[in-house]
Every structure is written in C-alpha cells, then in structure tokens.
Image (spheres, rainbow, N blue to C red):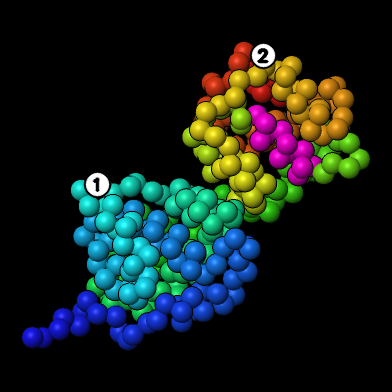
Amino acid sequence: MSIDTSTQPPQVLELEHLERLVAVGLAFPAEASPRHALIATLGTLVERLTAGEARALLAALPPPLQELLADRVARREGHPVVPLDRAEFLLRVATQLSITPVCAEQVVLTVFDTLRPWLPRAVVNGVTQQLPHGLKELWEGAAPTRSGPEAPDDARRQLVAEIEENAALPESVLATEAFEAVMCLLTRHVSRGEARDVLLSLPQTLQPLLTRCMLDRGENAISFDRDEFLHRLAEHLGTSVERAEQTARAVFAATKRVLPPKEVDDVSSQLPPDLREFWRLA
C-alpha cells in the first residue's frame, strides 16, 4: 500500500523537542509552560478551522500532542467555524495562559513559527486559506502591521502625561495605577462583553494594565451610581472623594481620547444617568 507523503510530516517530531523549540526566547509566567502554550494556541486555532481542516492539522502533529488536542478537535464536528479575528484569538490564548494579549501575540508567533516547518505543505496551505488577514499574518510568521499616526508607546506616554497633569493623585499612586483603578471599576458596571470590547479597542501598550481585572470579572455587571463609584475609588486610592472625582475625570478624558467613538458611546449606554453624565462630560 502506498503512503501519501503530502499528508505526512517531513520528519518525526517529538513533543519534548517541540516544547524545547517553543521555549527558546520565551519567558513564561510561573503558571504557564511551553506545553500550555502549544495547547492554548493550537486548541484555539482549531476553533477557527473547519472540522475537516482541524482533523488534518491534528493528524500532522506529534502523537502525544494529538492526544492533548483530540477532544477540542472532536468538538468541532457538526459545528460552524468560530469567527475569531486576530484580537479575539489573542484574547482567548491570553485568558488560557493568564498573560496579557501583548504577551500572547509573542507566544502565538513563536508556536506558529516553531511548528510550521514541521507540517506538510498541504496542511500549512489549508490552514492559511481559512484564516482572516490578521490571523494569517500570525500563522505565516509576520508581526501585524501597525497603522495610524501614533506609535503604541506614544499613546501610553500621552495618556500618562495627561493623567499626571490633570489628576489629583496621591503621592504613592502612579498615573498607570490610577488609570487601572478607574477603568477597572467603571467597566464593572458594563457587561463582560463590553468590557472586553473596551480592552481590545485600547492601544496595545495600555491593554496589559486592564487585562487581568477585565478577564477575571464575572459575566454580569455590578450596579452602582456615581456617588458609590467615587466612594469605592477613593477607598481604593486611599484619598478623599473630592480628589478621587478629579482623578476619575482626568482618566475618563484621557481614555476617551484613545478609544474609538463607538466604544465611548457603547460604554455610556450601559451606565446609569448620573455616571453616564460624568463619563460624557469628562
């Protein structure tokens, strides 16, 4: 019986060797590992593929890795492709590894770059054809193209400078800490889906400040009005309500300048009248 070499890996790849290759150049958090990175990345990838392409990818992987991913591939049967774009893909990987989307991007690039040369060309091409542009860039080993007049670092520097200039920060509180405190508290009042949309709409260098608090929260929003918001913020920052109000106003104004107008309006639509007015007029 002849063997179709187009569906066979170019040579035998052991899982342990693959893990060592992935580990090169990556500093994983204590709770993660190269094996976790492989499972999170490839398990999320198969959700973006048709069931047939997911099976083809699985068959090309080392047997121990096949066993770890078999259940996730089996769940693809009879279900449509999950329409993940690049941002949602990275957020899912980040959640599984307890890292930020910015770190997840480097993990995904490393996993894809390590694995791709070991896969049959037919499998590589099949995956490529099913991915949207942003994910295709990651799969093919290219960092996503940045667009816009400002570099991401510029957005973070300008936001920090604006908060430092206009907020009434206690001596022990940094502008980044104030941004995190204000926006984590505000987004507790919106749905988890909207909080996720806010996170993904921020410049990438600001996303790590909010990732953990937005991903660790429950699905449902918590109701509070403007007064309770300010009292909670004042307690968190260790300052007066008056200074908390000034800090919140400065953070709101700076944040609204880096968010798309649609996200500003979407947040506003989920706030109670007094807190909505505070957000709108900042």
Residue 101 lies, in percent from the top left, at 56, 53
Residue 127 lies, in percent from the top left, at 30, 64
Depth check, front residue: 191 or 19: 19
Residue furthest out toward the left: 1
Residue 125 lies, in percent from the top left, at 28, 69
For residue 233, say whether it is visible.
yes
Left or right, 21 with respect to 247, comes to: left
Residue 112 located within the stretch drawn in magenta:
no
For residue 247, say whether it is visible.
no
Depth check, front residue: 258 or 118: 118
Q: Is residue 75 above or below residue 194?
A: below
Left or right, 196 with respect to 53, comes to: right
Three-letter amino acid code at disc 1? His
Is label 2 in a helix, a strand or a loop?
Answer: helix
Depth check, front residue: 62 or 242: 62
Residue furthest out toward the top: 273
Could you say which disc has been placed on residue 79 in the image?
1
Residue named by callout 2:
274
Residue extent of the magenta highlight: 175-186
Left or right, 256 with respect to 162, comes to: left
Q: Give the image quarter of residue 235.
A: top right
Which SS type dominates the magenta stretch?
helix
Q: Is residue 74 above or below residue 173?
A: below
First in sequence, mark 1 or 2: give its number.
1
Left or right, 8 with respect to 239, comes to: left
**Crowding at mark 2 (Cα within 10 Å: few <14, some 14-19, many 20+):** few
Residue 66 lies, in percent from the top left, at 33, 69
Three-letter amino acid code at disc 2? Asp
Is label 1 in a helix, a strand or a loop?
Answer: loop
Q: Distance between the residues labelled 1 and 2?
A: 44 Å
Please report the residue visible at 32 percent of the width from the left and 58 percent of the height from the top.
71
Whether label 1 touches label 2, CB < 8 Å: no
